[in-house]
Amino acid sequence: MKEIKYVIKDPVGLHARPAGLLVKAAGEFKSTITITSNGKSADAKRLLMLMSLGAKQGMELTCQVEGEDEAAAAAAMQKFFEENL
């Protein structure tokens, strides 16, 4: 299992546009990708679950990746966070 921690820099936080892009990026991998923030967890492949996290600027996201392509998925998630959040 790989784990990534990232603090949201986007002033609007994890809103609809980046959440939709995150779901699309996560869907490219077979691994299970779970995002945790503020004591809540969500499957990164499900938009409504991600939106329910209510992640705002300055909050820390923890991304756990587990599965057969976890190394590639973790690298892609790290890159996504840096470019979009």
Image: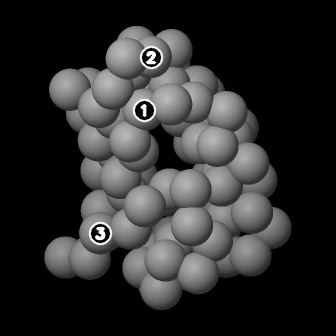
* N-term-proximal mark, 3 vs 1: 1
Amino acid type, residue under disc 1 in the picture: Ser
User: Regarding mark 3 in the picture, which secondary structure is present there?
Assistant: strand
Asked whether 64 or 61 is in front, the reply is 64
Seen at 67% across and 33% down, the residue is: 28
Q: Where's residue 73, x and y in %?
A: 50, 25
Q: Is mark 1 on a helix, strand or loop?
A: loop
Mark 1, residue position: 31
Q: For the residue carrying disc 1, how many other residues have a C-alpha within 10 Å: few (<14), some (14-19), or many (20+)?
A: many
Residue 50 on image: x %, y % = 52, 72
Residue 28 higher or lower than 59, as above or below: above
Residue nearer the viewer, 32 or 77: 32
The picture places residue 40, in percent across and down from the top left corner, at: 26, 76
Within 10 Å of disc 3 (Cα), the crowding (few <14, some 14-19, many 20+) is: some
In the displayed structure, does residue 61 sit left or right of residue 3? right
Name the mark on residue 69. 2
Residue 20 horizontal/vertical position (percent): 75, 63
Gap between marks 3 and 1, in whole Å?
16 Å
Q: In this view, does 71 lie above or below 7?
A: above
The Cα–Cα distance between marks 2 and 1, rounded to whole angstroms, is: 6 Å
Q: What residue type is labelled 3?
A: Ser
Q: SS class of the residue under badge 2?
A: loop
- Check disc 3 and report the residue beneath it: 41
